[in-house]
Amino acid sequence: MKSAHKVREENGYKCGLYASYIEYDAEQGEKMREMADLMSPYVDEMYALPLYNQADLVSKEESERDWTPVAGNRGRSAALRDSLPCWAVFTEGHITWDGKLSACCFDHDGRFHMGDLTKESFMSAWNSKVFQDLRQAHLCKDVRGTVCETCVAYA
């Protein structure tokens, strides 16, 4: 974050720097707030997220620790919203390590890929038919038959 902040300031880039953390429980949340204090000079905002179901990856192990996942991608802990439509498919471009545009920040296996940025522009992938169809399903609050169907919010 220090390096990103330095690059932004030295070059006058007009972009935001944000950091988030998962607040599994009160103890972990307190530890992260200490880290947030250290990072605060370098970010525009730092915020807590609840434990999401991570695209249906939250396991029995987490529930055995008394961690309760929040269904869907409902926003920040201090301002949760309805799980459908998922705000992220309308407002955030998630780019994977290999240059794919993903519809979900919890994409771990490529099922949420909406385009290949090594072969097409961001705007082309962002406005692709597959991404438009996914957004329409979210607006209709019916994601059956989409990559989002297995998210615990919609099961």
Image (spheres, rainbow, N blue to C red):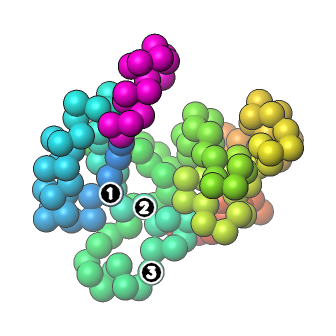
Q: Residues within 10 Å of mark 1 (few under 14, many from 20)?
A: some
- In this view of the protein, can residue 28 be seen by the observer? yes
- Queried whether the magenta region covers residue 51, the answer comes back as no
Q: Which mark is residue 52?
A: 2
Q: Please say if 23 is above or below 59.
A: above
Q: Residues within 10 Å of mark 2 (few under 14, many from 20)?
A: many
Q: Which residue is mark 1?
A: 22
Disc 3 is placed on an element classified as: loop
- Asked whether the beta carbons under mark 1 and mark 2 sit within 8 Å of each other, the answer is yes
Disc 1 is placed on an element classified as: strand
Q: Please say if 51 is above or below 57.
A: above
Left or right of 66, for residue 110 = right
Q: Please say if 40 is above or below 14.
A: below
Q: Disc 1 vs disc 3: which is toward the camera?
A: 1
Q: Please say if 65 is above or below 136.
A: below
Q: Disc 1 vs disc 2: which is toward the camera?
A: 1
Q: Which mark is residue 102?
A: none
Q: Amino acid at mark 2?
A: Tyr
Residue occupying image coordinates x 20% and y 54%: 32
Q: Position of residue 57 (x, y in %)?
A: 51, 73
Left or right of 8, for residue 22 = left
Q: Which residue is mark 3?
A: 59
- In this view of the protein, can residue 140 be seen by the observer? no
Q: Position of residue 6 (x, y in %)?
A: 37, 27
How far apart marks 1 and 2 lie (CA) works out to 8 Å
Which span is picked out in magenta?
1-17
